[in-house]
Amino acid sequence: MKNLSKLLYIILGIIVAICLFILFCGMNPDISKGLKEWIAENAPKKEVAAEEATVNVATAATSEVSVEPELEEEDSEEDYEYNYDLTYDDYVNDWDPSTVSQDTQNNPEYQDFVDAFLHPQENADDGNYPEDKSDMQSPQPKIVDIEDEEKAKERSEKLDYGDTGEDLTFDPLFYPYYHMLNSRGQALYKQIYANALAQKKKFAPVLSDANDNEILSAFCCVLDDHPELFWVDISFYTQYDYQGKAIEFDFKFYKNFNDIQYARMRFDNISDNLIAGAKDLESAYEKELYIHDVIVDKLNYQHNSLDQSAYSSVVDNYTVCAGYARCFQYLMQRLEVPAYNCTGWGGRERHAWNIVLLDDGYHNVDVTWDDSGENYDFFNLSDAENKQHRRMDFSVYLPKCVESDHKPKFAAQTTGVPSVSVDADDDTTYIAVSFGGSGSSRPYHYNVDSDGNVIRIDD
């Protein structure tokens, strides 16, 4: 009873205190105003905190949805072994032209190249060419068949098509390999290209009944047309289910790039610098000669982990023939001059060089072998003159190459290509050459033959 009385007195005291406080605030407006301001300042903070918490949850949920599903890998990079020991006969035996369009296969213009590839003459390797300068590698897939029905279904349900690229078009003058394929191959080509550009590593092929040759052919043609996809390794991974249905395509991106977007920025910026001196040149030949010599100056022949990629030659300075060829192809494309990556056999090894279109037709250009010698021996050659090279696979369907009058000349030329100043007595053939396009003097001396052709003999 005493406790109850005490409780009632406490409650009564609180009520009286509240009433007195209200009365006091009424008599003193400043205190009332301060209290309202404190409430106004702090109440929104709680609301903002609540809103931020809601946004964070929503962002986390969105990120979770947008991330590609992590799939259990059937292989690892450690157990992937590239076959470096393929012989010429192996390439011939593995060649399957069924993915090539009928119009291309039936075009008699390419028959000589097909015959030379499939039935080479015994003396095809004869001639002078640089040793150990032909280290191109062809794409090789790892193919896995999933026999377990439940496991195959689980993997296929986690993958979509990604970007099918169905609305893409490719100019035949710059992207000839796409136009060599039949309609099925072109559908796969578009999907592979679009997902490579989007850096989506895994997707389900748009043609579930595609066989491994169709996928391999589309992949090879994408790489041969698009040197700018430098982060795409030449190896890839495909999976088929227990019924032979193609359920997964996996790119293998080069591990050298932690940030592909940053690597692309470097690639573009350095490419801009390399072509800067050629942009204002008038003819395709002048641009070709400029880029040819820029590459010869810049690159050193050396194996490395990116040597099949254009990045090794555009950004870095060490590569093999594949890097030389893709660098030339890409820089010429940037200058709007059609140039193709031509693959085949050079001397006694797998090799890559280029075909370029000038005003007098198509010509063979081997920057790698020119960099190994002391002149322009492999610059703008016809197919007959290019006898140490033999086209293989899809490259047999590239245009025929003819003789060219476009060679470096003794006479002074337009700014950006070699301009000549005689560096000795009139009776000497040695001249110093400078490049006006870059504003720098090139440390070369050239020998001039009786026709006025310039041959570089030393640096």
Image (cartoon, rainbow, N blue to C red):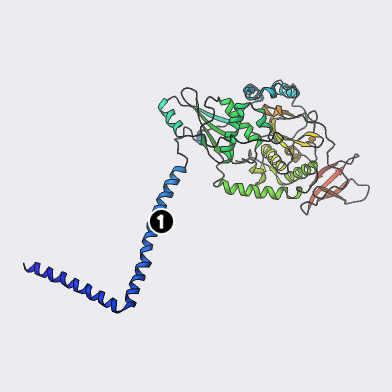
Q: Amino acid at mark 1?
A: Glu
Q: Position of residue 421 (x, y in %)?
A: 87, 51
Residue 319: percent from left, percent from top: 66, 41
Other residues around mark 1 within 10 Å, as few (<14) / some (14–19) / many (≥20): few
Quadrant assignment, res 383: top right
Q: In the picture provided, is 293 more to the left or to the right than 19?
A: right
**431 and 8: which is toward the camera:** 8
Extreme-bottom residue of the structure: 27
Q: Which residue ends up furthest to the right in the rendered image?
A: 427
Q: Nearer the viewer, residue 94 or 209?
A: 209
Q: Which residue is mark 1?
A: 52
In this view, 160 is above or below 122: below
On-image quarter of the N terminus: bottom left
Residue at point 47% right, 34% down? 159
Is 7 displayed left or right of 302 in the figure?
A: left
Q: Residue 335: where, in percent of width, then height? A: 73, 44
From this view, report whether residue 251 is shown above or below residue 2.
above
| Nearer the observer, 261 or 432 | 261
Of residues 237 and 441, the one drawn nearer to the viewer in this rendering: 237
Q: Is residue 35 visible?
A: yes
Image coordinates of residue 303 in percent, x first then y, are: 64, 40
Q: Is residue 172 left or right of residue 236?
A: right
| Residue 138 seen by the camera | no
Q: Quadrant of residue 89?
A: top right
